[in-house]
Amino acid sequence: MRSSQARVRVARVHADTGRSHRADTLAVEEPLEIRVNGTRLAVTMRTPVHDFSLAVGFALSEGIINSAEDVFRVRYCQKDQGPKGLNPHTQTQPNDYADGNGLASELAPPLGLGAFSGTESALQNTSDNVVDITLAPHVVPPSATVQRQLVVNSSCGLCGRQSLDEVHQNGCYPIDERSNFRLDEPTVMGLPDQLSEDQKVFAKTGGLHGAGLYDVDTGRMLVVREDVGRHNAVDKVLGWALMEGLLPLSDKVLVTSSRASFELVQKAAMAGVPMLVAVSAPSSLAVELAKESSMTLVGFTRGHRCVIYAGEERIVPPAADGASASMDVPDDAANSA
């Protein structure tokens, strides 16, 4: 049975106590081929859980789909019968098809909140390493030039692009008036702690990135996903949100346990996320894109400190925010990033 964790025998060496042998837990890394309408789109190195969310989120990031209505079916190749297949437009019972994410077959209209939050099933752990997304009839399939020419490894979500122009994707969800919220500084600085509370596999292995979606209205994490690749963890979160019918994510904050690279800011922008909070540093190109997208970008968010690189107006000192953790921002300020 496939799992997100693997046990190996290791030799631990300490300068004072010498060498000892014991079992250790590692994060699993395996390739996943993502197909669209039966044609290979990309191969990514990932942790094999929440594959359907990953594939759908990747397709969103590539600009292929924008909503749950754009997806006709998601399936593991050669295993599309019974629970292996996911067909959102067939009239089946709600629990006939599950993908290990707790996702049922009724995806059109969009799923209700929480449909992706079920426990992982044996299906998810015994799946193939090939996922195929069948697009709805009204969706134009990607051209052959979109196909990645290289494996997308666990540290690079843009590897395999064939030209510089392909690095930039145009999102269909610009930052709108729902993004005119404020969070106080303590709330923002506490987001990585909220994220880490749900990073169960990282707690055992120390080898996975985490990404989570924070809801400004409820003050809680809606979903947390883990993966060996930081871009995969974000795709899993965004894919979940898309199939839940939550896009654009105008009143949500994307939180990551990694650095804020250009690719992560771009993925957030594709989903209409107005704020990205990262544990480590951003790159210069990530900051430029955040400013162009009117996005708030926060890095080095650790303990009692953080650095705001773009969109400072959405984050206010506690005294300026009173007792409320969120409130509206004036329209002119929200558009000045």
Image (tube, rainbow, N blue to C red):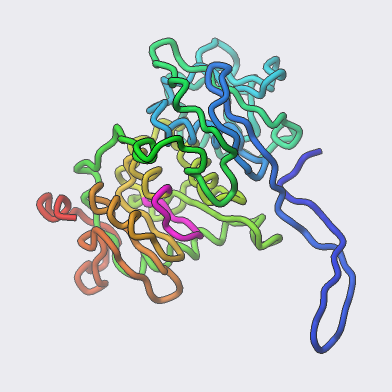
Q: Up-down: is 38 above or below 170?
A: above
Q: Is 48 part of what is drawn in magenta?
A: no
Position of 36 compared to 274: left or right? right
User: Horizontal and vertical percent for residue 279?
Assistant: 46, 64
- Point out the image quarter for the C terminus: bottom left
Residue 29, x across and y down, in percent: 69, 47
| Pick the front one: 274 or 18 | 18
Q: Residue furthest front?
A: 163
Looking at the picture, does residue 165 appear above or below residue 70?
below
> Outermost residue toward the bottom?
16
Question: Which of 284 and 99 lies nearest the eye of the viewer?
Answer: 284
- Closest to the observer: 25 or 198? 25
Residue 208 figure quarter: bottom right
> Can you say which quadrant of the picture contains the N terminus?
top right
Residue 145, x across and y down, in percent: 45, 25
Q: Quadrant of residue 201?
A: bottom right
Q: Is residue 28 left or right of residue 94?
A: right
Closer to the camera in the image, 69 or 159 = 159
Residue in the picture at 29% in, 35% down = 173
Bounds of the magenta span? 253-263
Kindly identify the residue that appears in the image at 58 percent across and 17 percent down.
38
The furthest residue to the left: 332
Q: Position of residue 169 (x, y in %)?
A: 34, 36
Q: Residue at x 37, y 71 (%)?
A: 306
Left of 14 or right of it: where is 178? left
